[in-house]
Amino acid sequence: MVKLRAIVPEDAFTAGILGSQRTGSGVVINSDGLILTIGYLVTEATDVWLTTPDGRELAGHPLAYDQVTGFGLVVPLEKADIAPVPFGSSA
């Protein structure tokens, strides 16, 4: 898990409803550090900051937002060294 902080321009379409400074969390889902989060946190974000469990702050990039599921993806811009969450089996 990481803490996520996003900055959105004041004149962005969603800023009036969702605000221009958003905070939430995300979960690391692969060994490259890809982070899954709720999409509204990173919609129209110009700056994304990730805080690791050990307190390091890393810059991130909002990679994708899926309108159907509401999920977003963020990629750290430097090596995060965080173990991804293990995926279980539905069997």
Image (cartoon, rainbow, N blue to C red):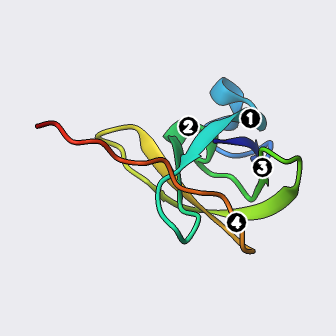
Kind of residue at disc 2 = Tyr
Q: Position of residue 70 (x, y in %)?
A: 40, 37
Mark 1–mark 4 distance (CA, rounded to whole Å) = 24 Å
**Is label 3 in contact with label 2 (beta carbons under 8 Å)?**
no
- Residue pointed to by mark 3: 52
Q: Going by the image, does 26 lie left or right of 60? A: left
Q: CA distance from mark 3 to mark 2?
A: 20 Å
Q: Is residue 49 above or below residue 16?
A: below
Using the rendered image of the protein, determine whether residue 69 is visible from the camera's viewpoint. Answer: yes
Q: Does residue 83 lie above or below 6 as drawn? A: below
Label 2 with label 1: CB-CB less than 8 Å: yes
Residue 40 image label: 2
Is label 1 or label 4 in front? 4
Q: Are marks 3 and 1 in contact (CB under 8 Å)?
A: no
Q: Which residue is mark 4?
A: 81
The local secondary structure at tag 4 comes to loop
| Amino acid on which disc 1 is placed | Arg
Residue 19: horizontal and vertical position, in percent?
74, 30
Describe the element under mark 3 as helix, strand or loop: loop
Marks 4,3: beta carbons within 8 A: yes
Q: CA distance from mark 3 to mark 1?
A: 17 Å
